[in-house]
Image (spheres, rainbow, N blue to C red):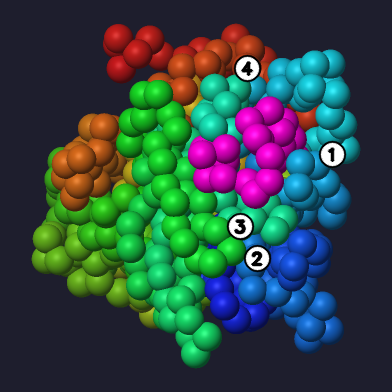
Amino acid sequence: MCGIVGVVSKAPVNQLIYDGLLLLQHRGQDAAGIVTQQGRKFFMHKAKGMVRDVFRTRNMRALPGNVGLGQVRYPTAGNAFSEDEAQPFYVNAPFGLVLSHNGNLTNAAELKAELFNTDHRHINTDSDSEVLLNVLAHELEKTTRGLPLNPVDVFAAVRGVHKRIKGSYAVVALIAGHGLLAFRDPFGIRPLCIGHGRNEDGKTVMVASESVALEGTAHQFERDIAPGEAVFVDMDGVVHAEQCADHPRLNPCIFEFVYLARPDSVLDGISVYQARLNLGETLAKRVVSTVPPNEIDVIIPIPESSRPSATQLAHLLGIPYREGFVKNRYVGRTFIMPGQGVRKKSVRQKLNVIASEFKGRNVLLVDDSIVRGTTSREIVQMARDAGARKVYLASAAPPVRYPNVYGIDMPTADELVAHDRTVEEIRQVIGCDALIYQDVEGMKRAIGSLNDKLDGFDASCFDGIYITGDITPETIAKMNEQRVSSSEESEVDVSRLALPNPQEA
């Protein structure tokens, strides 16, 4: 998961991109980068850290130009600790290209070998985004019929990219002297939208991962970029668009609505906030079937994504809703921090209890999802330490049982508390008095009902069905080799990565 922004304007764009990245900071806190273009020259600054730390006044002054793009990075492939893998990436031919990518390529290793042996292109990092950039560069070189570069050439190149790469990808790229290109994978797994604004110099076109980046920078949201579609914005701000995939389908990642996206965003026609309210409504039925409402004194959300679901749950059950945890906003999200030891230590730095809301009460805690279980276990213990009589835990999402390969940092089965465990076994690990999960079909109905034009969801971390059709246990094991070795964990046991038969799911 990353956040990307691209802008074509008649005025300098450095501040606009910076502001857009701040609005997408929740999508990545590891690194940030901006590239601008003046004439045919690119200007770049990128580094590890959050947006406010990476960019100083001197850096912003060194980013002139009316066209640019930026990214906030959340590492899911490559070396999470290497500043070399901060984006955007640059390649000089053809024309000069820079690219930022949100997602994860599932055939990156094969493509890297192809690029070296057949396309004669050198990849200097372990990042799949650099692989994607070079595939795009090679396809653009093949289709280019001369100068000036025409949109038809660009779209032909994107068609070639779709045929070669697999996985999830929302992409924004600059072609030196020609314009901005944005495109989305044929399943629409990762989000991407486009909007327009105006300044004293004229029209501005912006593409971004979430609608909140448009609205927060005074742009009018126009539409989501369709699965498989490519949008090319020339240097005059004229927008050209074309469908470049043979069989596009809209199957967005359902975890975007559960946890990743901001609640004030609208993705693929679905309000993220409303989706989370709906999850609370369907969760209410599960709670009632497990714990009688008269045995619950108070409902408390675990900040922050769970609040809409917890609010709706409390309303439907007629149980008081209270805030019982105060979040320190200056500590990184535990979900994306490396190493279980660091994650466990950070929970109490990140959350503090309001003891009066727990003392002597039977408390139902509501979380958006439970991934590794480490944080949940610590929070349950914090509630007990604050004097709670009983601690129940409800998850607005189903059990996360399978690795995610499309750009979310939950790829190793052994890290998932629900993998190969029953709900009762998970409850014992976490230490709560009752554990209530959303069910998979209920989750899909709750969110899917908000847009009947969806073809379905990527819900692979919940149901084990990988919509790109190329994922096997061996694939997952290979994708995890570098990640596992870098964290000094044991080798992945392929036999434990058994995936369900789609016919049985």
Residue at the spot of label 3? 179
Magenta segment main secondary structure: helix
State which tag comes first along the sequence, 4 or 2. 2
Secondary structure beneath dot 3 equals strand
Q: Position of residue 230 (x, y in %)?
A: 47, 43
Q: Nearer the viewer, mark 4 or mark 2?
A: 2
Residue at the spot of label 4? 475
Q: Determine the CA span between mark 3 and mark 1.
A: 26 Å
Q: Residues within 10 Å of mark 4 (few under 14, many from 20)?
A: some
Residue at the spot of label 2? 68
Amino acid of disc 1: Thr
* Residue 443 image-quadrant placement: top left
Q: Nearer the viewer, mark 2 or mark 1?
A: 2
Q: Determine the CA span between mark 4 and mark 3.
A: 36 Å
* Residue 453 visible somewhere in the drawing: yes
Q: Nearer the viewer, mark 4 or mark 3?
A: 3
Which region is colored magenta? 128-155
Q: Position of residue 322 (x, y in %)?
A: 30, 74
In the figure, 460 relative to 487: above or below? Answer: above
Cβ atoms under marks 4 and 2 closer than 8 Å: no
